[in-house]
Image (tube, rainbow, N blue to C red):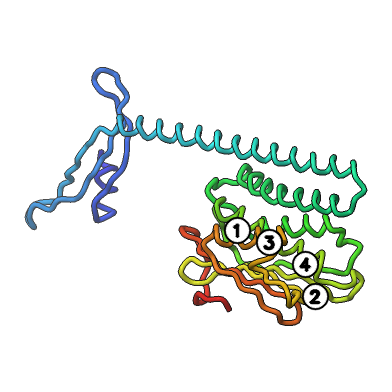
Amino acid sequence: MQAFALSVLEQGHGWIGEVVCQSRTGRQLEIEVSASELSLSTDHPSCIIALLRDISERKIAEARIKASLAEKDVLLKEIHHRVKNNLQIISSLFDLQSGETKDKTVLEMFRECRNRVRSMAMIHERLYSAQDLGRIDAVQYLSTLTSNLAHSYGLTSRHVQVRLEANEVYLDVDRAIPCGLIVNELVSNALKYAFQSAEDEGSEIVVQLEPKRDDRLQLTMKDNGIGFPAEVDFRNTASLGLRLVNSLVNQLDGEIEMREVDGTCFVILFRVGGTNLPEAEEPGLN
């Protein structure tokens, strides 16, 4: 008791803590103790006043809530794991089916579908292994995605380089999947059409993800290829990939514009509500 009193006096302000004690019936109780120094007068020494509150029921309720949350985390991880496995099976089916045809157009369709499925499977794979089930590291995800695309299109034997420039950004699953699919479509289009020769030195595709103010992100995909065909309106085209990009931008409630400066450049701006972003520039398509 003396040590307790000295501890309160040393702090010089209200003291609060939790202790475990035993009742007269032998029951274990968790007690919250609030204590502070009380000066009666200058002629009398200070005394300690303490308030004891039984918080045993609250602790039991907290333990139940923590156990329930832990169980839900396990279930969510299992869901992401199973979704990832199912998507990987679909991706493998595209690979197997590709071996049944020599038609280059059909093979390209299979490859495009497989890459789209893989971009979604990677989201669930990262959520399964993440500590925070509510968001994923966008930089790591896009880095893996662009590397997989480079491998899919055989860039190891070509001079085209795919480069990612991004800050530390986290996305929730509702934004990560559309964002990944957009990158998949635009990078794939550039790999297929932007460069006249695979042997051209200095050919590159750059993917940028940078924060703006007001919880907005700017996604930029640019290449230094031959440029986008002047006669094609990217907002109204028969291309499935570009139609998908426009639909996904609308899904993100974002804006998209195309620029032609030494190649082709797509700039997309969308809001990321509730996501922690680093210090950013003013909003706007820059």
Mark 4 is surrounded, within 10 Å at the Cα level, by few (under 14), some (14 to 19) or many (20 or more) other residues, namely: many
Mark 2 or mark 3, which has the lower sequence index? 3
Residue underneath mark 3: 183
Residue underneath mark 4: 190
Q: Residue at x 73, y 75 (%)?
A: 231
> In this view of the protein, which residue sits in the foreground, 107 or 33?
107
Residue underneath mark 1: 248
Indicate the quadrant containing the N terminus: top left, top right, bottom left or bottom right. Answer: top left
**SS at mark 1 in the image:** helix
Q: Residue at x 67, y 69 (%)?
A: 234
The spot of residue 37 in percent (x, y) is 18, 50
Mark 1 or mark 3, which has the lower sequence index? 3
Note whether 109 is above or below 239 in the view shown: above
Residue underneath mark 2: 225
The spot of residue 49 in percent (x, y) is 17, 44
Mark 4 or mark 3, which has the lower sequence index? 3
**Could you tell me the amino acid type at mark 2?**
Gly
**SS at mark 4 in the image:** helix
